[in-house]
Image: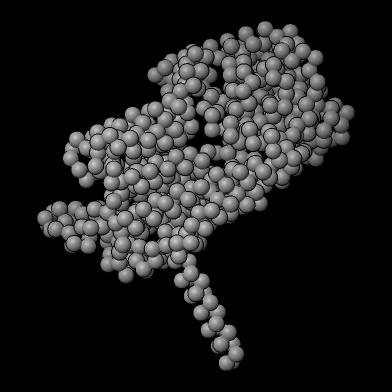
Amino acid sequence: MNALTRAISRLDAGVLRLWDGLDRAAVLRLSMWLGPVLAGLVSMSLGQDANWDLRNYHWYNPYALLNGKIGFDLNPGQFQSYFNPTIDLLYYGLATHFPTRVTAFAMGYLHGLNYVLLLMITRQVLRAGEPAAAGAAPYRLPLMLALAGCAGFSFLSQLGNTMGDNLTSLTVLGAIALLLRQWPQLLAGGARGAIVAALAGLVIGAGTGLKLTNANYALALCLALLTLRGSLWLRFSTAFVFGLGTLAGIGATAGHWYWLMWKTFGNPLFPQFNNIFKGPLAAQISVADMGWVPKDWTEFLLWPFIFTFNPRRVIELPMTQILWPIVYIAFIAFIAQRLRRLWLAAPAAPAAASRADAPGARMLLVFFALSYVIWIKLFGIYRYLVPLELLAPLVLWLLLHRLCAPPTARVIGATCVLLAVIAGLPRVNWGHHYHGEKSVTAQVPVFADPEQSMVFTVHGDPPMSWLIPNFPARLAFAALGSGFPESPEFAARVARMVAARKGPLYVMLTANGLAAGPRQGAAAPDADTAARQQRVAEAGQAILKRYGLTFDEASCIVYDAGFGGSRNSDPYQLCEVGHLP
């Protein structure tokens, strides 16, 4: 028993030494180097990215831009075919030149840079004006809060993939980090303050141009700058210059695409907001997905609790998290505390007043709250919350130190953050396949004259456009019945594309469960596969019939295709298309 007691004592002493050893500047600096590397290794261990959006448009869009397919094909990636592909050029370039393991590591490493920026933000806020919140661990606490932020469900479930939220979050955190690092210059105003604000706007504007869902963060940060401690002129001029920088950033990363969409389709945001721009190829509607937002004011007020208990309201994956209700309650308590002080006209305690004036802390809290409100009104899709999810542990820590005495705040904060991390660790992701030499492989038939032929796709799920880069570049593709807001001109465009081609026409259908080769004369598939293929065929025929077309099932030939090392994971079939009598 004495031996066991001594062993436990030595273990406890070792753990305490390790814990104390984390509170060193050298450890913090080392983590900034190792964090992105670790993220890259985790991404590589997950395998080849194969998420639904990659299959639908993240792989096709950069290919289309680089190969003159914009306007030549007709929305093969559904209406997302016309999203700005600039952000996807990075992944496409990596994946077409390097093995999948290299691509996965590079994407994970880049996503891991969020940890570095988050650490910089946390250090700046706690060190510059939150000594009570930092406590006696000026290096260990920022490290722990940054790690907790990177343990969020949305960030980890997207690690290394192509959805773009983990990549553009770098621009959001980068803008905040720049403002905090140059806080004295910002408050001093003048030319140097204007340059800082403009550069921060340029950074977050670049992210907004790459992915428009970041517009709420740009707007929220611009409004948060109005809370600066200074004159009214300083506040408005700083926010104005920041806004100009944001517009410049959007122009830098998306201006070329908006101009191309305007020239090609008469709508710079085609087909979105077509109720305003009225491009002829799409219906005159806004094309906004409002199915994820709260349905009424009751849901609006209780939303963090609702999507905690029913995550399907905000995300397609099964998700467990408890951090958002905790942060929400802390915000409500903080606002109630401030309103009570205003009502009673009671001055804040000196310590509380110093925390309220902490450089950047107030701006960060206002930014967080405004971003959440704008998100809930415009999107409601959880994976767009990556920047706020990363900042949430730090924000909770700041709120608790405004609500409680420092010792109490540290105990409550540490407990809440630890429980939130444990509960929120993702057990699922958006889809991966085994690694291979190439990211995408597909068996493709020979076309005698590709420019005189055409391929239709007739179901949006599963997406088929990821196969297109394997085909000849002058072979046209068009998606029918895919959810694109079709107008009468859309049907007329399809008819003109068909009439302009003298070669054979084809329809591409999914072929899961079918053996490669001609369908006619092949062994009969099992009952489930046969029933599924019958449903696919009937749905395809119904869609083609709207355009006066049909296809011959006896002509169908199955080809192998897949992601990474899963070469035959996603077979497809081509069937000859003809006109209805």
Placement of 328 over or under 107, stated as above or below: below
Residue 110: image quadrant is top right
Residue that appears at 29% across and 38% down: 193
Q: Position of residue 10 (x, y in %)?
A: 55, 82
Q: Position of residue 576 (x, y in %)?
A: 76, 19
Instruction: Using residue 256 as the reference point, say whether residue 396 is left or right of it.
Output: left
Foreground: 236 or 565? 236
Q: Position of residue 66 (x, y in %)?
A: 62, 23
Foreground: 434 or 568? 434
Q: Position of residue 305 (x, y in %)?
A: 40, 53
Colouring convention used in this rendered image of the protein? one colour
Foreground: 508 or 219? 219
Placement of 478 over or under 223, stated as above or below: above
Residue 506: image quadrant is top right
Residue that appears at 46% across and 45% down: 386
Instruction: Please identify the residue farthest to the left as the structure is shown.
Output: 345
Instruction: Using residue 11 as the reference point, say whether residue 563 is left or right of it.
Output: right
Residue 526: image quadrant is top right
Residue that appears at 15% across and 53% down: 342
Tell me if I can see residue 467 in this picture: yes
Tell me if I can see residue 332 in this picture: no
Residue that appears at 36% across and 31% down: 245
